[in-house]
Amino acid sequence: MRIGELAERTGTARRLLRYYEEQGLIKPTRAPNGYREYDESTVDRVVQIKGLLGAGLPTRIIKQILPCLDDPRGIQFDRATQETLELLERERESMTGRIQCLTRNRDAIGEYLEAVRAATEARRSRR
Amino acid sequence: MRIGELAERTGTARRLLRYYEEQGLIKPTRAPNGYREYDESTVDRVVQIKGLLGAGLPTRIIKQILPCLDDPRGIQFDRATQETLELLERERESMTGRIQCLTRNRDAIGEYLEAVRAATEARRSRR
DNA sequence: TTTGACCCTCACATCAGTGTGACGGTTTGA
DNA sequence: TCAAACCGTCACACTGATGTGAGGGTCAAA
């Protein structure tokens, strides 16, 4: 598919799809006329990228992470240098930290909303 | 405490502490000489802010979230407008999305690392 | 064959978070 | 009392993720 369709299906600006490519996160082929050609699997990949970006990871890190997702069994594990493995390990830990932070705060918001709703309800039934 | 100590205890640049203040996230008092004075609780708050920023939330949103954490029981719930409540609800949902995304990817990294290690181990023992 | 809807590259702009340094006042300990 | 180590405000700069627009090709349908 071409960039317009991909943009629409992933809810991503064309500009950003080109940017992700520039950062080495996706690699479309080119049609004879120069148009980018994306295959079906790119849809999921872009959604993934957006998710990770939204969760605060920079493209530099996302680039290292993506290959693990293609085939988590590590088919090309021999290409993984010691350095990369260490980076992945560190990143995994920092993701755990993020998750904990988000969870804690999300739950606090939940409690807050709950409390407000309960109070509102109580007030309403008092009348 | 003054800004230097807070910076050291939270691992945050002074510059950023001033920036957070400018964004309305923390409100130090001022000593007679103009120096900022932070109380003990600010340490936790700054850590919280850093965590949320790292998880991709902008200061604008963090500002709305923080009051819920001060007292999740919603002591000042009446100050919460309908609009704010809706924003919080939306933000809570988007945080859940982030958490899921991070969890999924973190686990995939974990599996990958596991696979690589297993393969490395197998190779070593074969020799 | 022209028009409208695509696509391309290039480049400049914006926004948030962050770094850094200039310039000057305050506090503290030798 | 003087130096070192704080603190203050400004303000300019950078980075990464985005927006936007100019100038120009491609292609399909009327």
Image (cartoon, coloured by chain):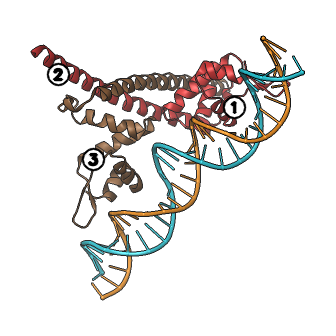
Chain colours: A brown, B red, C orange, D cyan
Q: Secondary structure at mark 2?
A: helix
Residue at the spot of label 1? B79
Q: Is residue B10 visible?
A: yes
Q: Could you tell me which residue is drawn at 25 percent across and 30 percent down?
A: A80
**Is the C-beta separation of discs 3 and 2 under 8 Å?**
no
Where residue B67 sits in the image (x, y, percent)? 64, 27
Query: Which mark is on residue B119?
Result: 2
**Left or right of residue B9, residue D17 in this image:** left
Which quarter of the rendering shows the N terminus of chain B? top right
Q: Could you tell me which residue is drawn at 44 percent across and 35 percent down?
A: A55
**Left or right of residue A23, residue B26 in this image:** right
Where residue A67 sits in the image (x, y, percent)? 26, 36
**Is the C-beta separation of discs 1 and 3 under 8 Å?**
no
Residue at the spot of label 3? A42
* Label 2 – label 1 distance at C-alpha: 58 Å
Q: Nearer the viewer, residue A47 or C15?
A: C15
Tag 1: amino acid: Arg
Q: Nearer the viewer, residue A122 or A38?
A: A38
Tag 3: amino acid: Thr
Which chain letter matches label 2? B
Which chain letter matches label 3? A
- Bin the neighbour count of mark 3 within 10 Å (Cα to Cα): few under 14, some 14-19, many 20 and up: some
Say yes or no: labels 1 and 3 on the same chain: no
Query: Which mark is on residue A26?
Result: none
Q: Is residue B71 visible?
A: no
